[in-house]
Image (cartoon, rainbow, N blue to C red):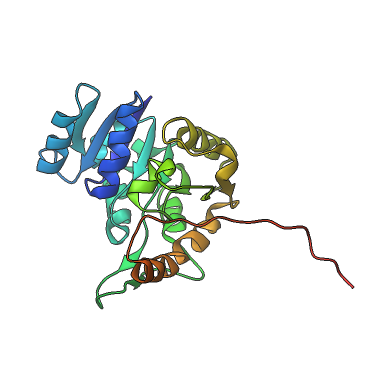
């Protein structure tokens, strides 16, 4: 499969590299065609890796991953092009973190909206799926780096798009099918994005970003 990755940071590089290793052709996109980080990544990863602009990556990919910083994501997907992304699956991995007041970050968007929803509104013909944004890059692409069972969440308006993303998560990244929890439509992005303040607090307490959560389900409560 041909896949576009928007963003050259830690998350974009981890996802793009894993996808190449899984046998996909991947184009990493950034603001400029000659972005040094993207070009260097492509050289390191062989014939199936290439670099270009956001629009180049979006046009190249059958599926596109948004791995840009949340504060710039709307700008990035608009640069990729609404018509270019029409009818394609866009996996939104970004979180709307606000570092303007220092650490810990707060959220730029919360409660009644989410970055995932804003991207879906900006790209009405694109099939946006929110996923992977509740774990760090090390865990995103290799869940077996953590011992035991743990969960990943996804959401989106298009059932077929979620099924396709589910397949990439299991077949290319190694997530167990039963570990992936579908939270419903794209408004579920509010929940996963608003998990980030807890994630940041846990990171500060644990002193280690390599962790995740597990949903444990018991019998239904007895009423009366």
Q: Say which residue appears at 58% left-offset and 48% top-offset.
A: 181
Q: Position of residue 203 (x, y in %)?
A: 36, 66
Q: Is residue 132 above or below residue 18?
A: below
Residue 184 visible somewhere in the drawing: yes
Q: Quadrant of the N terminus?
A: top left
Residue 58 visible to the viewer: no
Q: Nearer the viewer, residue 20 or 2?
A: 20
Q: Residue furthest bottom?
A: 101
Say if 115 sits above or below 126 in the image.
below
Q: Looking at the rendering, which quadrant does residue 29 occupy? A: top left
Q: Nearer the viewer, residue 224 or 43?
A: 224
Q: Quadrant of residue 50?
A: top left
Q: What residue is at 29 percent from the left and 30 percent from the top? A: 26
Q: Position of residue 159 (x, y in %)?
A: 59, 40
Relative to 154, say whether 42 is above or below: above
Label count reads 0
Relative horizontal placement of residue 59, taking residue 119 as reference (left or right)? left
- For the view shown, which residue lies furthest in the right direction? 224
**Residue 151 or 183: which is nearer the viewer?**
151
Image position of 198 (left or right of 97): right
Residue 217's spot in the image, x, y percent? 68, 56
**Which residue, as the protein is rendered here, is positioned at the far front?**
147
């Amino acid at each position: 499969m041909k896949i576009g990755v928007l963003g050259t940071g830690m998350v974009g590089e981890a996802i793009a590299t894993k996808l190449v290793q899984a046998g996909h052709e991947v184009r990493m996109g950034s603001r400029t065609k000659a972005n040094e980080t993207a070009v260097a990544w492509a050289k390191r990863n062989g014939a199936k890796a290439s670099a270009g602009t956001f629009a180049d990556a979006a046009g190249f990919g059958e599926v596109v991953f948004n791995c840009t910083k949340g504060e710039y994501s709307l700008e990035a997907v608009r640069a990729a092009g609404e018509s270019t992304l029409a009818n394609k699956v866009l996996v939104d991995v970004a979180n709307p973190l606000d570092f303007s007041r220092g650490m810990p970050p707060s959220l730029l968007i919360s409660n009644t909206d989410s970055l995932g929803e804003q991207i879906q509104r900006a790209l009405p013909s694109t099939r946006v799926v929110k996923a992977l944004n509740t774990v760090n890059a090390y865990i995103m692409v290799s869940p077996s780096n953590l011992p035991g069972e743990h969960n990943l969440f996804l959401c989106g308006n298009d059932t077929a798009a979620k099924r396709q993303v589910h397949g990439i998560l299991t077949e290319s990244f190694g997530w167990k099918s039963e570990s992936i929890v579908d939270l419903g439509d794209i408004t579920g992005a509010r929940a996963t994005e608003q998990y980030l303040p807890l994630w940041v607090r846990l990171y500060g307490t644990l002193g280690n970003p390599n962790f995740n959560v597990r949903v444990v389900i018991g019998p239904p409560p007895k009423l009366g």
